[in-house]
Structures are given as structure tokens and as C-alpha cells.
Amino acid sequence: MTAGADAQERVDVPIALDFTPLGTQAASPVHEAPADMSFGIYPLSVFGIENAIKRADARADDYASGLERFDVGPIAYSVVAIRDWERRYPSDPWIPKELLGLCHFYVHVGTSDARAAATQAADWLRHDYPSSAYAKAVDDALATQ
């Protein structure tokens, strides 16, 4: 089995969406993750995470109508990847941006489960990055719920 086939098989495997804040304990003295480094069980780079969130947001109506589940596939793997990214590079200034992107996505889906996920992602953002501009903007994102 090729690495690509293995990754493809894992797309529809349900995983737990864990939005528990990690805190700010540094695992690395380096503040920014290398752009080509992969995170999570479905290896995503920093740009891969951003693109997965954008692609999911473009399909938010499919999630809202029940045609697709919002808690599997690339968006779920993005949550896992962000947790891994933060664990290794907690001071990376791009993490709060992706957490806000998750909030926007879940708000856009609009179901009750997605709204709960948006609130959890917002709590994670506020807890671990309280002084970031993204933490200040998250209330505006949630206000559209």
C-alpha cells in the first residue's frame, strides 16, 4: 500500500474533536513552525491546515444540510493537526489565525453541533492566545451564530 493510499483510507475515520486548550508551555524554543513540517495523524503542513479549513468552509452548506458530516475528514484532521502544531510550537503566531478560521467554519455550518464546536474552538483561542488580535475578533465571529 502506498503512503497516499493509506492517507486516503483514513479520510472517513471518525476522530474525537478535542478543543481543550493546551496552555502556553513551550515545547520548542523556535516560535514558528517550518512551512514544510507536517502535523497530526493525517499529515498536514501549516498551509495544508489553512487550505483544509478554507475548502471545508466552501462546502459549509453541504455540512449544514447533512450531505456531509463536519466532524470527519480534512476538517477533523485539521483540529488534530492544530493541536499537534500548538504542542510543538505554542508561540507560533499563525495558530490563532487558524483557530479563528475554525470558528468561522463552524459558525458558517450553523447546526447546533457545529455551533457548539465553534464555541469550543473560540474558548481554546481565548484561553491560549488571549492577547492576539484573533482572540479579540472571535466574539464578532460568534455573534453571527
Image (cartoon, rainbow, N blue to C red):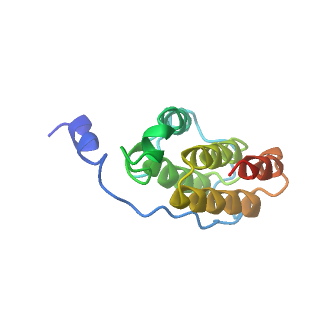
Determine which quarter of the picture holds residue 50.
Answer: top right
Residue that extends furthest to the left in the rendered view of this protein: 1
In the rendered image, is residue 55 in sight? yes
For this view, does 43 lie left or right of residue 89? left
Identify the residue at horizontal 30%, vertical 54% (top origin): 13
Query: The N terminus is located in which quarter?
Result: top left
Residue 29 place in picture, x, y as percent: 69, 52
Task: Give the mark count.
Answer: 0
Q: Position of residue 41 (x, y in %)?
A: 38, 52
The location of residue 145, given as percent across then percent down, is 68, 52
The one nearer the camera, 107 or 42, is 107
Closer to us: 97 or 118: 118
For the point 26% across and 40% down, the residue is: 8
Q: Nearer the viewer, residue 128 or 141?
A: 141
Residue 38: percent from left, percent from top: 46, 42
Residue ranking furthest to the front: 65
Q: Say if 61 sits above or below 72 in the image.
A: above
Q: Is residue 43 visible?
A: no
